[in-house]
Image: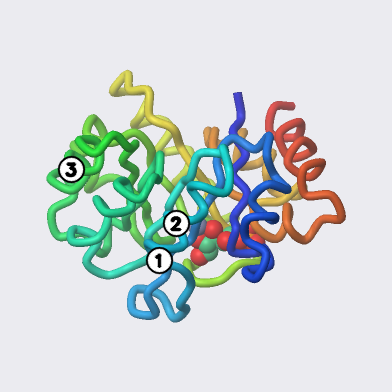
Amino acid sequence: MAQINPSILSADFARLAEEARAVEGADWLHVDVMDNHFVPNLTIGLPVVESLRKATDTPLDCHLMIEDPDRWAPAYAEAGAGSVTFHAEAAAAPVRLAREIRAKGARASLALRPATPIEPYEDLLPELDMVLIMTVEPGFGGQAFLDIMLPKIRRTRQLIDRHGLALWLQVDGGVSAATIERCAEAGADVFVAGSAVYGAEDPAAAVGALRDRAER
Ligand code: DX5
Ligand code: ZN
């Protein structure tokens, strides 16, 4: 079953609660946390996650594009995120961090920037619930999908399957009706979509249409 996670980054930040409720029926709400250090953009932090938690029943999928996730990521689990994704490039002790996130009751997920290979992280896979393959350079919504990432998606799926693991494989960046089928075919099963959902006339219908395409 394909999961569709609308990214609140493309929503109207002055109407976050309403925008979150506009996509009820989505599997998760993707929340992009940026610190203006790990990426050249600044978005939202813990207080907004706490408030969003109360504003919607959709579980929160927090994608931390921040430095020092070792210090901050467990707090996102405490703030109510059901899934916490930290970047491989930023984490000092990814195994310890994944364990801490899981101990707080959230799913632990590892994200890779486009130039970061999956292979060095193969032995960590059993500590994780999801791997996120970035299909754009993180930092901004609305960028073009990097189809040179498709082989990495495929290799990651093969590693997960070879180890007999139940990890989810998420893609994020430029996912739309035009690109989602290629991602699904390569082995992704969780799809983040920002502009393709919130840029649509009817965001809830866009979620359904993306899910249909991913499952074709
Ligand atoms: C980018 C963020 C994405 C972004 C995706 O750094 O991690 O989640 O919101 O937006 P679209 O789907 O418009 O590429
Ligand atoms: Zn994201």
Q: Nearer the viewer, mark 3 or mark 1?
A: 1
How many angstroms separate mark 2 from mark 3 (CA)? Answer: 19 Å
The crowding category of the residue bearing disc 2, from other C-alpha atoms within 10 Å (few below 14, some 14 to 19, many at least 20), is many
* Corner quadrant of residue 73: bottom left
The label shown at residue 100 is 3
Q: Name the residue at 24% across, 36% down.
A: 102
Residue 116: give x, y in percent of width and height.
34, 59
Q: Is residue 86 left or right of residue 95?
A: right
Question: Label 2 is placed on what type of residue?
Answer: Val
Q: Secondary structure at mark 2?
A: helix
Residue on which the image places disc 2: 49
Q: Name the residue at 51% across, 47% down.
A: 54
The label shown at residue 147 is none
Residue 28: give x, y in percent of width and height.
55, 40
Q: Quick check: marks 2 and 3 in contact, CB under 8 Å? A: no
Q: Secondary structure at mark 1?
A: loop
Question: Label 1 is placed on what type of residue?
Answer: Gly
Residue on which the image places disc 1: 45
Quarter of the image where ligand 1 sits: bottom right
- Label 2 vs 3, first from the N-terminus: 2
The crowding category of the residue bearing disc 3, from other C-alpha atoms within 10 Å (few below 14, some 14 to 19, many at least 20), is some
Quadrant for the N terminus, please: top right
Q: Quick check: marks 3 and 1 in contact, CB under 8 Å? A: no
Quadrant for the C terminus, please: top right
